[in-house]
Amino acid sequence: TRKMILDLDTGIDDAMAIAYAVAAPDVDLIGIVASYGNVLTPLAAQNSLKILELLGRLDVPVFLGELHASTTDHFDVMPISAQIHGKNGIGEVALPTPKRQVEAKSGVDFLIEAAHQYRQDLIVVPTGPLTNLAKAIKIAPEIQDEIGQVTLMGGALTVPGNVSPVAEANINQDPVAADQVFESRLNLTMVGLDVTLRTLLTKKETQQWRELDTVAGNKFADIVDYYIDVYKITSPHLHGCALHDPLAVGVTLDPSLVSTLNLNMFVDTTKAMWGRTIGDPARLTEEAPNVSVALTVDQEKYLARFMQYLTTLFKQ
Ligand code: BDR
Ligand code: CA
């Protein structure tokens, strides 16, 4: 079986990505790296520990990643993030203090060592800023050729951004790191707003989790209902909450969930276009495009699988 590392700023949809990866039958979740973004890095790590414990997975180690973007020395949570995910990142829902602690090894070292060990069997799924991965490839460039697949949630090619007219939140946090990842030799798939904004969950589905009458089912329903309520205010046209981060996990395990365009992409780091993910006009005719961009998604198939996986998991 293939090995998966999640790199998360946990976050409500990041929590759903953990559940999806834990529930998926065909992959082995070997660790979670924490990032800053929806919350500060230490809180993202605590949230990942809490969610793993809720799901009965005390065997999956959690590592601390970078605390801020590669180009700054400080990070503050954006007010919009605190609004969407709650101040605690998981919809103000209380979960028990985790029994375990984060590992002593850094998240970046863990990524590098796992790449050396598992090579093509390793899948990395970042659903926060790309700071950790960029740092790992800077320290150990050979991992670009070792890691089998990187499927990231981030960016927007055919739709506007969600934190600026051109930038999606994860890329916007550290466009310089994102560009290093985009222009690397990594085998990269971008699962951006183009597809994630088409995959929506409603309270009809979270009600099914409640009806399981389990702790995991009830807690996840509470956490995700918070997110659905926020979406009603911030994105009333969507009729549900976007399943951003779990879609990256879904696509890496089953690429047939989306259609893709292969393109030489880069991340714009100029002030006017900060964080825009776009094709490089100078490299349109070059062979071997560097990024596979998801453009359309089979919503029904994905939602059915998402519900099948999570419901089965929450039943246990
Ligand atoms: C992304 O930003 C974060 O708030 C979410 O967790 C997701 O990864 C969506 O733009
Ligand atoms: Ca995220």
Image (cartoon, grey):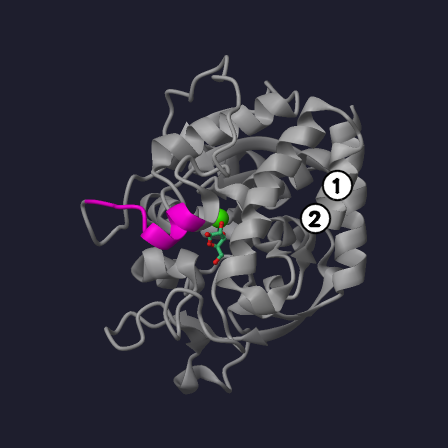
Q: Helix, strand, or loop for circle 2?
A: helix
Left/right of residue 136 with respect to residue 60 in the rendered view: left
Q: Is residue 80 magenta?
A: yes
Viewer-side residue, 303 vs 141: 303
Badge 1, how many Cα within 10 Å: few under 14, some, many 20+? some
Measure how far apart labels 1 and 2 are at the Cα level.
Answer: 6 Å
Q: Which residues are magenta?
A: 74-83
Give the residue drawn at x 79%, y 40%.
Answer: 208
**Which disc number belongs to residue 215?**
none
* Rendered location of residue 1, percent (x, y): 73, 36
Residue at the disc numbered 2: 203
* Rendered location of residue 209, percent (x, y): 75, 36
Viewer-side residue, 199 vs 278: 199
Query: Quarter holding the C terminus?
Result: top right
Q: Helix, strand, or loop for circle 1?
A: helix
* Rendered location of residue 144, percent (x, y): 46, 52
Badge 2, how many Cα within 10 Å: few under 14, some, many 20+? some
**Vertical placement of residue 52 versus 70, above or below:** above
Residue at the disc numbered 1: 207
Task: Report the residue that reaches farthest toward the top.
Answer: 99
Left/right of residue 159 with respect to residue 296 in the rendered view: left
Give the residue drawn at x 22%, y 54%.
Answer: 71
Q: Are marks 1 and 2 in contact (CB under 8 Å)?
A: yes
Q: Is residue 221 magenta?
A: no
Q: For the residue marked with disc 1, what is the amino acid?
A: Gln
Give the residue drawn at x 51%, y 87%.
Answer: 285
